[in-house]
Amino acid sequence: MQAPSRPDYVSVHLTGQQTGSYNNGKQWRRQSYWRKWKQLSRLQRSLFLFMLVLLFICGLASYSSVTKQLRGFTVREQETESNILQKPFKPHALPEPVKQGQDPLPDQLSQRKLSNKRGPPVRPNRLQKQGNTSNILSEVKVADIKKEGEEERVISWRGAVIDTVQATDGTKDGENKEDSPGNRNVNQSKVLETERMEAVREAFRHAWKGYKEYAWGHDELRPVSRSYSEWFGLGLTLIDALDTMWILELKQEFEEAREWIASELTFNRNVDVNLFETTIRILGGLLSTYHLTGDSLFLDKAKDVGSRLMPAFNTQSKIPYSDVNIGKGTAHPPRWTSDSTVAEVTSIQLEFRELSRLTQEPQYQAAVAEVMNQVHKLEGKLDGLVPMFINTNSGQFTHQGIFTLGARADSYYEYLLKQWIQGGKKEDQFLEDYLQAIEGVKKNLLQKSSPNGLVFVGELSHGQFSPKMDHLVCFLPGTLALGAHNGLPADHMDLAKELMHTCYQMYVQMETGLSPEIVHFNMHQGSIRDIDVKPADRHNLLRPETVESLFYLYRFTKDRKYQDWGWKILQNFNKYTKVSSGGYTSINNVCDPDYPSPRDKMESFFLGETLKYFYLLFSEDADLISLDNCERLQARRLHIPSKWNRFSPRNRK
């Protein structure tokens, strides 16, 4: 028996609806949505519910954030109006807006990001690996608020609220002039100046604490091992730091050092010393302190050591030997060669010339003038650039064909300009040699890196260019700026600014924010980064060249970015080189912020030069160390301003 046949179609009869009509009623729509919901799989329905919950939570969070911001703005307005400011402090000057047509610096972050890193180092230090310490910096909270179409910026630091909006052209009706934005900015700038200068004084005190406890009267502190090392046994660090202490107004430390010099320092010792190093650190330190204090003790000591260095000039060529026995009165070249470096024999002139002026004894100036006269006439130069070595027997350049503004030649160029200024701008020989050398640098050594086009000074070896630049070359921006300030071509200042930016990049592009001793710049198209550092060149010796040039550039341009750059460098010195027990140490690896590997040595120039230039950079007082009317210039290498003029702008006794 067959089953009844089944139709091959489905017949649907809709009741309650008329043929040809469309029912859009609410009840029908609800039934339709429900059917669609039921048709979804369990996974699809779960995902849909999850998204709804997530959107609800985000909405609550946004509402809470907006509410807190509005409340915080109201509180800040009330605090500003009632002047409830704890010790006001403007941590770090905001970067100036980029001018139209000018590319922003590659290292600059947004204003918000920059501000989050600002603020002075916290004084209590925490010991880092192997004796290194890392100061914990107070974070600065920044709120960006737009009001009436203009962006305002409020910086909060330890509960203090500081308005950094630029000064307006006038005050509003009924506004107290003393509380006007312009006056507040002036006050905040003064507070910032005071805080930064005090940070330098605190750094000096910390370094001096280590030297006093573990190396008193010796040449150099070894801060990690809490001991000392000797070079000549003449208290190099103590003498090198004398004028810095005076400028920083560290009265107690200065009096302690003076007492040691009066009672303990003697140069009647059977010891070999390096002519150049003794001149710039000891003779220069004593002469500069005499200028600042007028204390004849320092001039007497300077005359004593200066006279003991004179046997170095007793050579057939009149080019001095590198080493002198100050007790026996004998001199000799290094044990391994009869050559001296050009920088050594041409970077002692300022000190010896000034010693002659003060003592009225011409032999000191005559000896160093003979050296410059011979170098001026020598063959072997390239467009004013000099080789690195000179023979003390023949008086001729050796190792010819290699030209650099780095080690062994650097300060020859610096002292050309400063001798011209020291002599009242009357000795044309120095000016001619200097201007010719700068043109030689532009023609032979100046190049740009890839990808960001950093202008740098390389080296030339037998016609082959090398993109190698020593940190020592960072003396050049300051020297160029000084020359432009004294009437030399204006494009020298333009080049100074470009090189200053490059020297700063040698710091900020390193992981520790500290420059290595030597860098190599990439020049190939497609390079990822401008700067490479070889493993053997990664050390930092606490050198002053970049800080010195920052001081010059700020003094002549008043562009606050140079102060800000210096402040970042000082913070990184505190973070990676400060030793908790006292002192600062040079480090082996600026590319490793976790363990920069301390070298356990604090060079005397860190106190004698680096910290001094930080202090002068942060000071707004142009008369603290005047850079004008410098006819009576006397200086040691990279240590110039503290010796200029026979002056004492303030009696700091």
Image: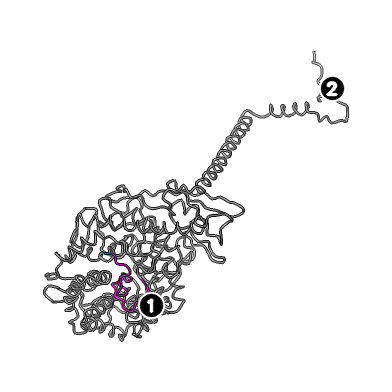
Corner quadrant of residue 650: bottom left
Give the x, y percent position of residue 530: 44, 63
First in sequence: mark 1 vs mark 2: 2
Residue count near mark 1 (Cα–Cα under 10 Å), binned few <14, some 14–19, many ≥20: few
Label 1 secondary element: loop
When the figure is inspected, residue 65 is found, relative to residue 290, above or below; the finding is above
When the figure is inspected, residue 357 is found, relative to residue 165, above or below; the finding is below
Q: Residue furthest top?
A: 1
Badge number at residue 463: 1
Please tell me how many numbered marks the rendered image carries: 2
What residue is drawn where x is 41% and y is 52%? Answer: 119
- The stretch in magenta equals 626-653
Kind of residue sitting beneath label 2: Thr
Give left or right: position of 164 versus 302.
Answer: right
Kind of residue sitting beneath label 1: Gly
Give the x, y percent position of residue 140: 45, 49
Q: Quadrant of the C terminus?
A: bottom left
When the figure is inspected, residue 586 is found, relative to residue 548, above or below; the finding is above
- Mark 2 lies on residue: 15
Give left or right: position of 461 versus 337.
Answer: right
